[in-house]
Amino acid sequence: MARVLVIEDDQQTAVEMIDELQRQGFTAEHADNGKLGLQRAMSDEFDVLTVDRMLPDTDGLTVVSSLRARGKNLPVLMISALSDIDERIRGLRSGGDDYLTKPFAPEEMIARIEVLLRRTATEVQVNRLRIADVELDIIRRTAMRQGEDLDLMPTEYKLLEFLMRNSGQVVTRTMIFEAVWNYHFDPGTNVIDVHVGRLRKKIDPPGVLPLIKTVRGAGYRFSETR
């Protein structure tokens, strides 16, 4: 059962976040300002932090950069009402691992936390990823299905790697855009759907078990199950 420290000064937002985390099986605790949040994060053993960008006393950027300067490497999800690219970059460069913009769906918060926890659990370098009969060679950056080489463009490879590293979980279009293209999702573009479609033609040709699933209204899932 993962422990999450929610550093958030807005009481209503904090209550909603903690309620959702607890419903999903997490142990969630709360700090309502940056100074207290930094103290708790340094003194207690948490598995992941959510840190609001704008906090009284000590802002979120300072909290995260102070943690990193003191050798705390636990994953951090930055949360903010500030959505422009410069703010997102500042949040990530301060030491945040991911950035979620308010308002957000509780399901996306949970999905991002789960991704951060899985990433931490698998930080030991692996040379290969294998799901069903698809195999990635991380060193050579090649892909195979049923023992046959797949001719993937660099972006298609990054997209496949991200889907496989999060196999069985729904990943949103926003998460894909940030992981593969490294910038904020424009809801007016269909670039993700186009690239997923191209990847599908190579990964899931007729006659094999489809692995890339569309989850209507949510995103995509890479899975052997239907």
Image (tube, grey):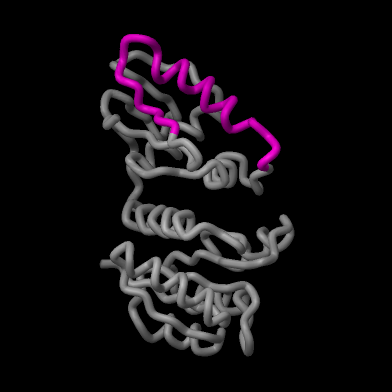
Which residue does the image show at 34% across and 38% down from the upper left?
127
Residue 21 position within the rendered picture, expressed as x and y whole percent measured from the top left: 38, 67
The reply, left or right, for residue 208 in relation to residue 20 is left
The N terminus appears in which quarter of the rendering?
Answer: bottom left
Q: In the image shown, does 73 or 81 lie closer to the viewer?
A: 81
Asked if residue 195 lies in the magenta stretch, the reply is yes
Residue 72 in view, yes or no: yes
222 relative to 101, above or below? above
Residue 184 is situated, as x and y percent measured from the top left of the image, at 65, 48
203 falls in the magenta region: yes
Q: Is residue 183 above or below residue 1?
A: above
- Residue 223 picture quarter: top left
The location of residue 72, given as percent across then percent down, is: 44, 74
User: Which residues are the magenta region?
Assistant: 187-214
User: Which quarter of the figure has residue 22?
Assistant: bottom left
Residue 164 appears at what percent x and percent y? Answer: 38, 37
Q: Quadrant of the C terminus?
A: top left
